[in-house]
Amino acid sequence: MSNDDGVEAPGLRALAEALAPLGEVTVCAPDREQSASSHSISLHRPLRIEELPPWGTIRRYAVDGTPTDAVYVGVNHLLRDRRPEVVASGVNRGPNLAMDVLYSGTVAAAMEGAAMGLPSFAVSLVARGKPDFGPAAAFAAKLAAELGKRRPAPGTLLNVNVPPGKPTGAAITRLGRRTYSAAVVEKLDPRGRAYYWIGGDEQAHENVPGSDCDAVFDRGLISVTPLHLDLTQHALLEELRGWELPGLLPSQ
C-alpha cells in the first residue's frame, strides 16, 4: 500500500485497516505529502527508508521520495522475497478524475504497481470538510478481493473515485473532462525577487455521459475507471504511415 498524502495520512490508515482482513498488509509510503508528483522517480539521489511503529499487524515504512519511489522500493526491496498480490494506493483526500490521472501521485503509485505486472488500483475521495474515509475504504476492500481473484491483464489498473457522504451505488466509467483556471500567481520574497505559484481551481466538468465526473458529481456514484499503460494512439497509426516523412519505411 502507498499514497501521495504521506505515510501518516488518515485515508491511508483507513484503507490499510480495511484491507487487513484480506491478508498481510505492508505500507510503504512517502514520508510527507507528494500530491501532484505524477510518476516522478528519484534516479539522481539516494533514498532513505524508515520503519515506523505498526498499526496493529500492519507493518509501515516511510520513504523520503515520491509515491513511485515508495512502490518501487516496497516491491523490489522490502517485499522482494514475497511479492505482493495487489498494490493499493489511497485513500486520497480529494478526487482524481479525468485528466487528473496525469498529475496524481495517488494514481502514479498504482501505475507503478501495474508496470510491475501486479493487480493495482487507486482510490480517492471527494472530500468536503472533515472527510469520512469509511465508505471508500470499505468499497476498496471488496475491490481488492476481486482483483486478487480475477487478476486483470498486465499493464492495467483501476482508478476509483468516491463521492462525499453515502454513495448511491457504483458505475464502471471512462475518463471525463474537467476544466481548471490556468492561474499563475506572482509574488515577491522578502528580498524583492519574484516567485510563482502555478495551478488553479476547477471551473467546471463537462457533461460526458458514462464518465467518471458524471458518475461522481451528477449521480452520487462511485466511479471505477480502467486505465492502461499503453499510450499508443492506435487510430492514428495508419494515417501516420501515409505522411511524407524522410526515410519512412513501408508498412510491414
Image (tube, rainbow, N blue to C red):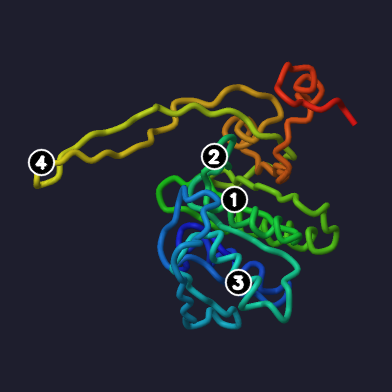
For this view, does 141 lie left or right of residue 72?
right
The reply to whether residue 119 is in sight is yes
Label 3's element?
helix
Instruction: Tell which circle, 4 or 1, labels the residue nearer the N-terminal end.
Output: 1
Mark 3–mark 1 distance (CA, rounded to whole Å) = 16 Å
Residue 57, by quadrant, is: bottom right
Mark 4–mark 1 distance (CA, rounded to whole Å) = 38 Å
Q: Nearer the viewer, residue 15 or 176?
A: 176
Residue 244, by quadrant, is: top right
The reply to whether residue 9 is in sight is no
Where does the N terminus fall, quadrant-wise? Answer: bottom right
Which tag is nearer the camera, tag 3 or tag 2? 3
Mark 3–mark 2 distance (CA, rounded to whole Å) = 25 Å
Mark 3 and mark 2 residues within 8 Å of each other at the beta carbon: no
Residue bearing the label numbered 3: 74
Q: Residue furthest front?
A: 247
Expressed as whole percent of the image width and height from the top left, the position of residue 247 reads 74, 26
Mark 2 and mark 1 residues within 8 Å of each other at the beta carbon: yes
Q: Label 1 sits on what residue type?
A: Val
Instruction: Tell me what residue is drawn at x 73 percent, y 31 percent.
Output: 233
Instruction: Tell which circle, 2 or 1, labels the residue nearer the N-terminal end.
Output: 2
Circle 4 Cα neighbour tier, 10 Å, few/some/many (<14 / 14–19 / ≥20): few
Which tag is nearer the camera, tag 4 or tag 1? 4
Residue bearing the label numbered 4: 192
Location of residue 160 with respect to 45 vertically, above or below: above
Which tag is nearer the camera, tag 3 or tag 1? 3
Mark 4 and mark 1 residues within 8 Å of each other at the beta carbon: no
Q: Label 3 sits on what residue type?
A: Gly
Location of residue 188 with respect to 35 vertically, above or below: above
